[in-house]
Image: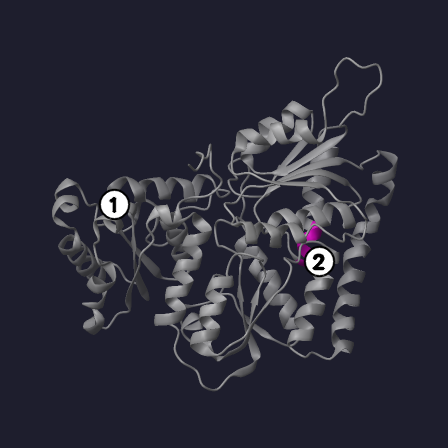
Amino acid sequence: MSKFIERPRYLCSMGGAVATLKALPKAISIIHAAAGCGGNFGNALNGATGYLGSGYCAGQALPSSNVYEKDIVFGGEERLEEQIANTLEIVDGDLYVVVTGCMVDIIGDDAVAVANRFKDSGKPVLAVETGGFKGNSFKGYDLVLGKLFRDFVAQQPVKDKQTVNIFGLVPIQDVFWKGNLNILKALLNKLGFKANTFFGEGETIDNLKQAGAASLNIVVSDVYGIGPAQIFEETHDVPYVVVPLPLGPSSTEEFLRQVGAALKVDHTLVDQVIAEEKAHYYGYVERLGDVYNDLDFQRYSVIVADANYGPALTKFVADDLGWLPELVVITDILSDEEQALVADRFRGFASGIAPKVVFDTDTSNVSKHFSAAWPRNNNARYFDSFSPAFVLGSSLDREFAESLGAAHLSVTYPISNRVVLDRTYLGYDGSLRLIEDIFGLLVGSR
Protein backbone atom coordinates (compact mmCIF):
# COMPACT_ATOMS: atom_id res chain seq x y z
CA MET A 1 0.00 0.00 0.00
CA SER A 2 1.34 3.48 -0.88
CA LYS A 3 2.01 5.76 2.06
CA PHE A 4 0.29 9.11 2.40
CA ILE A 5 2.10 12.32 1.56
CA GLU A 6 2.10 14.99 4.23
CA ARG A 7 2.13 18.62 3.06
CA PRO A 8 2.97 17.77 -0.56
CA ARG A 9 5.23 19.99 -2.63
CA TYR A 10 3.13 19.78 -5.77
CA LEU A 11 -0.46 19.52 -6.98
CA CYS A 12 -2.16 16.56 -8.64
CA SER A 13 -1.75 15.93 -12.37
CA MET A 14 -4.78 18.08 -13.21
CA GLY A 15 -3.33 20.91 -11.13
CA GLY A 16 -0.07 20.59 -13.06
CA ALA A 17 -2.01 20.65 -16.32
CA VAL A 18 -3.86 23.82 -15.29
CA ALA A 19 -0.56 25.44 -14.25
CA THR A 20 1.05 24.52 -17.57
CA LEU A 21 -1.83 25.98 -19.55
CA LYS A 22 -1.94 29.07 -17.34
CA ALA A 23 1.65 29.79 -18.36
CA LEU A 24 0.83 29.52 -22.08
CA PRO A 25 -0.24 32.90 -23.49
CA LYS A 26 -4.03 33.06 -23.98
CA ALA A 27 -4.48 29.32 -23.43
CA ILE A 28 -7.72 28.62 -21.59
CA SER A 29 -8.19 25.66 -19.26
CA ILE A 30 -11.71 24.21 -19.11
CA ILE A 31 -11.95 22.08 -16.00
CA HIS A 32 -14.22 19.06 -16.13
CA ALA A 33 -14.43 18.22 -12.45
CA ALA A 34 -16.11 19.20 -9.20
CA ALA A 35 -16.16 22.87 -8.16
CA GLY A 36 -13.63 22.40 -5.35
CA CYS A 37 -10.84 21.42 -7.72
CA GLY A 38 -10.60 24.76 -9.48
CA GLY A 39 -10.81 26.70 -6.22
CA ASN A 40 -8.00 24.70 -4.66
CA PHE A 41 -5.81 25.15 -7.75
CA GLY A 42 -6.41 28.88 -7.73
CA ASN A 43 -5.13 29.17 -4.17
CA ALA A 44 -2.18 26.81 -4.62
CA LEU A 45 -1.05 28.46 -7.85
CA ASN A 46 -1.05 31.89 -6.26
CA GLY A 47 -0.03 31.84 -2.63
CA ALA A 48 2.50 29.02 -2.92
CA THR A 49 4.36 30.35 -5.96
CA GLY A 50 5.86 33.59 -4.75
CA TYR A 51 2.44 35.23 -5.18
CA LEU A 52 1.97 34.65 -8.88
CA GLY A 53 -1.49 36.15 -9.15
CA SER A 54 -4.48 34.94 -11.12
CA GLY A 55 -3.36 35.92 -14.60
CA TYR A 56 -5.57 35.83 -17.68
CA CYS A 57 -8.80 33.86 -17.18
CA ALA A 58 -7.33 31.75 -14.41
CA GLY A 59 -7.41 31.67 -10.62
CA GLN A 60 -11.00 31.78 -9.41
CA ALA A 61 -12.17 32.65 -12.95
CA LEU A 62 -11.31 29.25 -14.43
CA PRO A 63 -14.12 27.86 -16.63
CA SER A 64 -15.39 24.65 -15.03
CA SER A 65 -18.21 22.18 -15.58
CA ASN A 66 -18.63 21.96 -11.77
CA VAL A 67 -20.12 18.48 -11.97
CA TYR A 68 -22.17 17.25 -9.02
CA GLU A 69 -24.01 14.10 -7.96
CA LYS A 70 -26.40 13.94 -10.94
CA ASP A 71 -23.52 14.15 -13.43
CA ILE A 72 -21.55 11.49 -11.60
CA VAL A 73 -24.51 9.11 -11.64
CA PHE A 74 -25.71 9.74 -15.21
CA GLY A 75 -22.52 11.01 -16.84
CA GLY A 76 -21.23 14.54 -17.30
CA GLU A 77 -20.54 14.73 -21.04
CA GLU A 78 -23.64 16.82 -21.76
CA ARG A 79 -22.64 19.26 -19.02
CA LEU A 80 -19.09 19.45 -20.45
CA GLU A 81 -20.37 20.19 -23.96
CA GLU A 82 -22.47 23.01 -22.56
CA GLN A 83 -19.48 24.42 -20.68
CA ILE A 84 -17.20 24.32 -23.73
CA ALA A 85 -19.82 26.13 -25.83
CA ASN A 86 -20.28 28.82 -23.18
CA THR A 87 -16.52 29.27 -22.77
CA LEU A 88 -15.96 29.68 -26.52
CA GLU A 89 -18.68 32.32 -26.59
CA ILE A 90 -17.54 34.32 -23.56
CA VAL A 91 -13.77 33.85 -23.20
CA ASP A 92 -11.34 35.18 -25.79
CA GLY A 93 -8.52 32.66 -26.16
CA ASP A 94 -6.11 31.29 -28.74
CA LEU A 95 -6.31 27.71 -27.44
CA TYR A 96 -8.88 25.88 -25.30
CA VAL A 97 -7.96 22.69 -23.47
CA VAL A 98 -10.30 20.53 -21.39
CA VAL A 99 -8.59 18.93 -18.40
CA THR A 100 -10.36 16.23 -16.43
CA GLY A 101 -10.54 15.37 -12.74
CA CYS A 102 -10.58 12.08 -10.90
CA MET A 103 -14.35 11.55 -10.73
CA VAL A 104 -15.12 12.06 -14.41
CA ASP A 105 -12.20 9.86 -15.43
CA ILE A 106 -13.43 7.11 -13.11
CA ILE A 107 -16.99 7.17 -14.49
CA GLY A 108 -15.65 7.14 -18.05
CA ASP A 109 -16.66 10.51 -19.47
CA ASP A 110 -15.05 10.80 -22.92
CA ALA A 111 -13.80 14.37 -22.80
CA VAL A 112 -11.75 13.91 -25.96
CA ALA A 113 -14.84 12.93 -27.96
CA VAL A 114 -16.77 15.90 -26.58
CA ALA A 115 -13.94 18.29 -27.49
CA ASN A 116 -13.87 16.85 -31.02
CA ARG A 117 -17.47 18.01 -31.49
CA PHE A 118 -16.08 21.56 -31.71
CA LYS A 119 -13.70 20.94 -34.61
CA ASP A 120 -15.72 23.23 -36.85
CA SER A 121 -15.99 26.02 -34.27
CA GLY A 122 -13.08 27.91 -35.77
CA LYS A 123 -11.19 27.72 -32.49
CA PRO A 124 -8.78 24.96 -31.39
CA VAL A 125 -10.36 22.80 -28.67
CA LEU A 126 -8.45 19.85 -27.22
CA ALA A 127 -8.95 17.58 -24.23
CA VAL A 128 -6.50 15.75 -22.00
CA GLU A 129 -7.36 13.11 -19.41
CA THR A 130 -5.57 14.37 -16.31
CA GLY A 131 -7.29 12.62 -13.39
CA GLY A 132 -5.36 13.43 -10.24
CA PHE A 133 -4.59 9.78 -9.55
CA LYS A 134 -2.31 9.71 -12.63
CA GLY A 135 0.43 11.60 -10.84
CA ASN A 136 1.49 15.03 -9.64
CA SER A 137 2.10 18.45 -11.22
CA PHE A 138 5.03 17.18 -13.24
CA LYS A 139 2.87 14.46 -14.78
CA GLY A 140 0.26 17.05 -15.72
CA TYR A 141 2.96 19.03 -17.53
CA ASP A 142 4.01 15.96 -19.50
CA LEU A 143 0.41 15.03 -20.35
CA VAL A 144 -0.44 18.49 -21.67
CA LEU A 145 2.74 18.81 -23.73
CA GLY A 146 2.28 15.32 -25.15
CA LYS A 147 -1.24 16.21 -26.31
CA LEU A 148 -0.15 19.52 -27.81
CA PHE A 149 2.76 17.97 -29.67
CA ARG A 150 0.55 15.27 -31.17
CA ASP A 151 -2.56 17.24 -32.02
CA PHE A 152 -1.73 20.95 -32.12
CA VAL A 153 1.83 21.55 -33.30
CA ALA A 154 1.79 21.75 -37.11
CA GLN A 155 3.85 19.43 -39.29
CA GLN A 156 6.91 21.23 -40.63
CA PRO A 157 8.83 19.14 -43.19
CA VAL A 158 11.47 21.86 -43.58
CA LYS A 159 13.55 22.44 -40.45
CA ASP A 160 15.19 25.69 -39.35
CA LYS A 161 18.74 24.81 -38.34
CA GLN A 162 18.98 27.89 -36.11
CA THR A 163 15.86 27.18 -34.01
CA VAL A 164 15.57 24.92 -30.97
CA ASN A 165 12.87 24.12 -28.40
CA ILE A 166 13.38 23.89 -24.63
CA PHE A 167 11.53 21.41 -22.37
CA GLY A 168 11.92 20.26 -18.77
CA LEU A 169 11.30 23.44 -16.75
CA VAL A 170 7.80 22.90 -15.39
CA PRO A 171 6.13 26.34 -15.31
CA ILE A 172 4.85 27.58 -11.97
CA GLN A 173 6.02 24.37 -10.27
CA ASP A 174 9.39 25.96 -10.95
CA VAL A 175 8.53 29.25 -9.28
CA PHE A 176 11.35 31.01 -11.17
CA TRP A 177 10.41 29.56 -14.55
CA LYS A 178 9.97 32.82 -16.43
CA GLY A 179 13.29 34.35 -15.45
CA ASN A 180 14.99 30.99 -15.93
CA LEU A 181 13.63 30.64 -19.47
CA ASN A 182 14.88 34.13 -20.29
CA ILE A 183 18.36 33.06 -19.25
CA LEU A 184 18.25 29.87 -21.33
CA LYS A 185 17.10 31.83 -24.39
CA ALA A 186 19.92 34.34 -23.88
CA LEU A 187 22.56 31.61 -23.57
CA LEU A 188 21.39 29.90 -26.75
CA ASN A 189 21.23 33.24 -28.52
CA LYS A 190 24.91 33.76 -27.72
CA LEU A 191 25.59 30.50 -29.57
CA GLY A 192 23.65 31.83 -32.55
CA PHE A 193 20.31 30.08 -32.01
CA LYS A 194 16.71 31.12 -31.44
CA ALA A 195 14.93 29.21 -28.67
CA ASN A 196 11.23 28.48 -28.32
CA THR A 197 10.39 28.05 -24.65
CA PHE A 198 6.56 28.27 -25.07
CA PHE A 199 6.17 29.72 -21.56
CA GLY A 200 8.65 32.60 -21.69
CA GLU A 201 8.31 36.32 -22.20
CA GLY A 202 7.07 37.60 -25.55
CA GLU A 203 6.03 34.19 -26.87
CA THR A 204 2.67 33.38 -28.40
CA ILE A 205 0.61 30.32 -29.17
CA ASP A 206 1.98 30.59 -32.71
CA ASN A 207 5.48 29.86 -31.38
CA LEU A 208 4.09 26.58 -30.11
CA LYS A 209 2.13 25.95 -33.32
CA GLN A 210 5.27 26.31 -35.46
CA ALA A 211 7.62 24.48 -33.07
CA GLY A 212 7.87 21.51 -35.42
CA ALA A 213 10.31 23.52 -37.54
CA ALA A 214 13.02 23.31 -34.85
CA SER A 215 16.16 21.31 -35.48
CA LEU A 216 16.67 20.12 -31.89
CA ASN A 217 14.78 19.81 -28.60
CA ILE A 218 16.77 20.53 -25.44
CA VAL A 219 15.52 18.91 -22.22
CA VAL A 220 16.98 20.43 -19.04
CA SER A 221 15.76 17.61 -16.82
CA ASP A 222 16.53 13.94 -16.36
CA VAL A 223 12.88 13.02 -15.79
CA TYR A 224 10.50 15.83 -16.82
CA GLY A 225 9.83 16.61 -20.45
CA ILE A 226 11.45 13.36 -21.60
CA GLY A 227 8.14 11.74 -22.56
CA PRO A 228 6.96 14.80 -24.52
CA ALA A 229 10.37 15.03 -26.23
CA GLN A 230 10.01 11.41 -27.36
CA ILE A 231 6.51 12.14 -28.68
CA PHE A 232 7.87 15.19 -30.49
CA GLU A 233 10.61 13.13 -32.10
CA GLU A 234 8.12 10.47 -33.23
CA THR A 235 5.58 13.01 -34.52
CA HIS A 236 7.80 15.75 -35.96
CA ASP A 237 11.14 14.02 -36.56
CA VAL A 238 13.05 16.37 -34.25
CA PRO A 239 15.71 14.72 -32.03
CA TYR A 240 16.31 15.72 -28.43
CA VAL A 241 19.24 15.98 -26.07
CA VAL A 242 19.20 15.84 -22.24
CA VAL A 243 21.49 18.34 -20.51
CA PRO A 244 22.01 19.39 -16.87
CA LEU A 245 20.05 22.28 -15.42
CA PRO A 246 22.59 25.14 -15.76
CA LEU A 247 22.60 26.47 -12.20
CA GLY A 248 26.02 27.82 -11.27
CA PRO A 249 29.06 28.50 -13.46
CA SER A 250 30.24 24.88 -13.51
CA SER A 251 26.89 23.48 -14.65
CA THR A 252 26.37 26.35 -17.09
CA GLU A 253 29.69 25.67 -18.76
CA GLU A 254 28.76 21.99 -19.01
CA PHE A 255 25.39 22.98 -20.48
CA LEU A 256 26.97 25.20 -23.13
CA ARG A 257 29.51 22.57 -24.15
CA GLN A 258 26.93 19.78 -24.43
CA VAL A 259 24.44 21.93 -26.33
CA GLY A 260 27.20 23.30 -28.53
CA ALA A 261 28.32 19.78 -29.41
CA ALA A 262 24.75 18.65 -30.16
CA LEU A 263 24.21 21.67 -32.43
CA LYS A 264 27.65 21.35 -34.00
CA VAL A 265 28.68 24.85 -32.95
CA ASP A 266 32.29 25.75 -33.60
CA HIS A 267 34.13 25.03 -30.34
CA THR A 268 35.96 28.35 -30.69
CA LEU A 269 32.65 30.22 -30.34
CA VAL A 270 31.62 28.09 -27.36
CA ASP A 271 34.97 28.79 -25.67
CA GLN A 272 34.57 32.51 -26.37
CA VAL A 273 31.05 32.65 -24.88
CA ILE A 274 32.14 30.74 -21.78
CA ALA A 275 35.20 32.96 -21.29
CA GLU A 276 33.16 36.16 -21.59
CA GLU A 277 30.45 34.90 -19.22
CA LYS A 278 32.97 33.68 -16.64
CA ALA A 279 34.86 36.99 -16.74
CA HIS A 280 31.59 38.80 -16.02
CA TYR A 281 30.59 36.35 -13.27
CA TYR A 282 33.89 36.21 -11.40
CA GLY A 283 34.37 39.96 -11.80
CA TYR A 284 31.51 40.31 -9.33
CA VAL A 285 32.10 37.22 -7.19
CA GLU A 286 35.69 38.20 -6.37
CA ARG A 287 34.28 41.15 -4.42
CA LEU A 288 33.00 38.67 -1.85
CA GLY A 289 36.44 37.19 -1.14
CA ASP A 290 37.17 39.44 1.83
CA VAL A 291 33.82 39.08 3.58
CA TYR A 292 33.68 35.33 2.84
CA ASN A 293 36.99 34.77 4.61
CA ASP A 294 36.83 37.47 7.30
CA LEU A 295 33.37 36.44 8.50
CA ASP A 296 33.88 32.72 7.82
CA PHE A 297 30.91 32.28 5.49
CA GLN A 298 31.53 28.66 4.64
CA ARG A 299 28.54 26.58 5.71
CA TYR A 300 27.28 23.06 6.16
CA SER A 301 24.11 22.72 4.15
CA VAL A 302 20.96 20.66 3.67
CA ILE A 303 19.10 20.79 0.36
CA VAL A 304 15.43 19.79 0.04
CA ALA A 305 14.26 20.03 -3.55
CA ASP A 306 12.77 18.35 -6.60
CA ALA A 307 14.58 16.21 -9.16
CA ASN A 308 15.58 19.25 -11.21
CA TYR A 309 16.82 21.58 -8.49
CA GLY A 310 18.24 19.02 -6.05
CA PRO A 311 21.32 18.00 -8.08
CA ALA A 312 21.78 21.49 -9.54
CA LEU A 313 21.74 23.27 -6.17
CA THR A 314 24.01 20.67 -4.60
CA LYS A 315 26.62 20.98 -7.35
CA PHE A 316 26.50 24.75 -7.05
CA VAL A 317 26.91 24.64 -3.28
CA ALA A 318 29.74 22.10 -3.40
CA ASP A 319 31.72 23.10 -6.49
CA ASP A 320 31.04 26.83 -6.86
CA LEU A 321 30.24 28.15 -3.39
CA GLY A 322 32.73 25.99 -1.49
CA TRP A 323 30.17 24.76 1.03
CA LEU A 324 29.63 21.30 2.51
CA PRO A 325 26.29 19.74 1.51
CA GLU A 326 25.75 16.85 3.90
CA LEU A 327 22.18 15.82 3.09
CA VAL A 328 19.96 16.12 0.01
CA VAL A 329 16.29 15.11 0.12
CA ILE A 330 14.57 14.71 -3.26
CA THR A 331 10.85 15.16 -2.71
CA ASP A 332 9.32 13.94 -6.00
CA ILE A 333 7.43 10.74 -6.72
CA LEU A 334 9.92 8.90 -8.92
CA SER A 335 10.27 5.39 -10.30
CA ASP A 336 13.37 3.35 -9.45
CA GLU A 337 14.77 4.11 -12.90
CA GLU A 338 14.18 7.83 -12.48
CA GLN A 339 15.76 7.79 -9.02
CA ALA A 340 18.85 6.17 -10.51
CA LEU A 341 19.11 8.88 -13.17
CA VAL A 342 18.82 11.64 -10.58
CA ALA A 343 21.24 9.94 -8.17
CA ASP A 344 23.84 9.76 -10.92
CA ARG A 345 23.94 13.57 -11.04
CA PHE A 346 25.46 13.61 -7.55
CA ARG A 347 28.56 11.69 -8.65
CA GLY A 348 31.80 13.18 -9.86
CA PHE A 349 31.64 16.61 -8.27
CA ALA A 350 34.88 18.54 -8.82
CA SER A 351 35.09 19.15 -5.07
CA GLY A 352 35.01 15.40 -4.40
CA ILE A 353 32.06 15.82 -2.04
CA ALA A 354 29.49 13.01 -2.03
CA PRO A 355 26.45 14.04 0.05
CA LYS A 356 23.92 11.58 1.40
CA VAL A 357 20.97 11.54 -1.01
CA VAL A 358 17.53 10.23 -0.03
CA PHE A 359 14.23 10.15 -1.89
CA ASP A 360 11.20 10.92 0.28
CA THR A 361 7.95 12.77 -0.42
CA ASP A 362 7.03 13.49 3.21
CA THR A 363 8.02 16.84 4.66
CA SER A 364 8.05 15.54 8.24
CA ASN A 365 10.78 13.00 7.41
CA VAL A 366 13.44 15.55 6.53
CA SER A 367 14.42 15.93 10.18
CA LYS A 368 14.59 12.13 10.57
CA HIS A 369 16.90 11.79 7.59
CA PHE A 370 19.11 14.53 8.97
CA SER A 371 19.37 12.81 12.36
CA ALA A 372 20.42 9.60 10.60
CA ALA A 373 23.04 11.43 8.53
CA TRP A 374 24.35 13.61 11.37
CA PRO A 375 23.68 12.14 14.84
CA ARG A 376 22.81 14.67 17.53
CA ASN A 377 25.00 15.28 20.54
CA ASN A 378 24.26 12.76 23.30
CA ASN A 379 25.79 14.79 26.15
CA ALA A 380 29.28 14.00 24.89
CA ARG A 381 32.05 16.37 25.89
CA TYR A 382 33.28 16.67 22.33
CA PHE A 383 31.16 16.31 19.23
CA ASP A 384 30.90 17.63 15.69
CA SER A 385 28.32 20.38 15.65
CA PHE A 386 26.34 20.95 12.46
CA SER A 387 27.08 24.64 12.58
CA PRO A 388 27.15 27.09 10.97
CA ALA A 389 24.51 25.74 8.61
CA PHE A 390 22.19 26.75 5.79
CA VAL A 391 19.04 25.10 4.43
CA LEU A 392 17.97 25.48 0.81
CA GLY A 393 14.43 24.22 0.34
CA SER A 394 10.84 25.44 0.30
CA SER A 395 8.71 27.38 2.76
CA LEU A 396 7.88 24.03 4.36
CA ASP A 397 11.51 23.65 5.48
CA ARG A 398 11.72 26.85 7.50
CA GLU A 399 10.77 25.09 10.74
CA PHE A 400 13.42 22.42 10.14
CA ALA A 401 16.04 25.11 9.54
CA GLU A 402 15.06 26.84 12.78
CA SER A 403 15.54 23.56 14.67
CA LEU A 404 19.14 23.53 13.43
CA GLY A 405 19.71 27.20 14.12
CA ALA A 406 20.38 27.52 10.39
CA ALA A 407 19.61 30.24 7.89
CA HIS A 408 17.01 29.30 5.30
CA LEU A 409 16.17 30.35 1.73
CA SER A 410 13.07 29.18 -0.14
CA VAL A 411 14.07 28.24 -3.68
CA THR A 412 11.64 25.43 -4.58
CA TYR A 413 7.85 25.04 -4.56
CA PRO A 414 5.99 25.89 -2.39
CA ILE A 415 7.27 29.41 -1.78
CA SER A 416 4.96 31.56 0.35
CA ASN A 417 7.48 33.61 2.35
CA ARG A 418 8.87 35.73 -0.47
CA VAL A 419 7.65 37.49 -3.61
CA VAL A 420 9.02 36.25 -6.93
CA LEU A 421 8.73 38.32 -10.12
CA ASP A 422 11.44 37.83 -12.76
CA ARG A 423 13.99 36.28 -10.38
CA THR A 424 16.22 33.66 -11.94
CA TYR A 425 18.88 31.31 -10.60
CA LEU A 426 20.09 29.77 -13.88
CA GLY A 427 23.13 30.63 -15.93
CA TYR A 428 25.92 32.94 -14.87
CA ASP A 429 23.64 35.90 -14.20
CA GLY A 430 21.17 33.80 -12.21
CA SER A 431 24.00 32.41 -10.10
CA LEU A 432 24.91 35.95 -9.10
CA ARG A 433 21.30 36.49 -7.98
CA LEU A 434 21.41 33.30 -5.90
CA ILE A 435 24.66 34.35 -4.27
CA GLU A 436 23.16 37.76 -3.49
CA ASP A 437 20.12 36.14 -1.88
CA ILE A 438 22.18 33.67 0.17
CA PHE A 439 24.84 36.06 1.41
CA GLY A 440 22.28 38.81 1.85
CA LEU A 441 20.58 36.61 4.42
CA LEU A 442 23.86 35.90 6.20
CA VAL A 443 24.96 39.51 6.52
CA GLY A 444 21.41 40.61 7.27
CA SER A 445 21.34 38.47 10.42
CA ARG A 446 24.53 39.95 11.88
Residue at position x 76%, y 53% in the image: 348
State the residue position of label 2.
251
* Residue type at the position of mark 1: Met
Q: Between marks 1 and 2, how big is the CA–CA gap?
A: 43 Å
Relative vertical location of residue 213 with respect to residue 44 in this rendering, above or below: below
Q: Which residue is mark 1?
A: 103
Instruction: Give the percent coordinates (x, y) of residue 394.
Output: 56, 38
Image x and y of residue 307, in percent:
58, 49
Is 88 on the left or on the right of 55, as rendered? Answer: left
Residues in magenta, as a range? 427-432
Classify the position of the C terminus by image quarter: top right
Q: Is residue 398 left or right of residue 416?
A: right
Q: Is residue 428 magenta?
A: yes
- Where's residue 90, x and y in %? 21, 58
Horizontal side of 48 relative to 285 (left or right) equals: left
Q: Quadrant of the N terminus?
A: top left
Q: Is residue 163 left or right of residue 425?
A: left
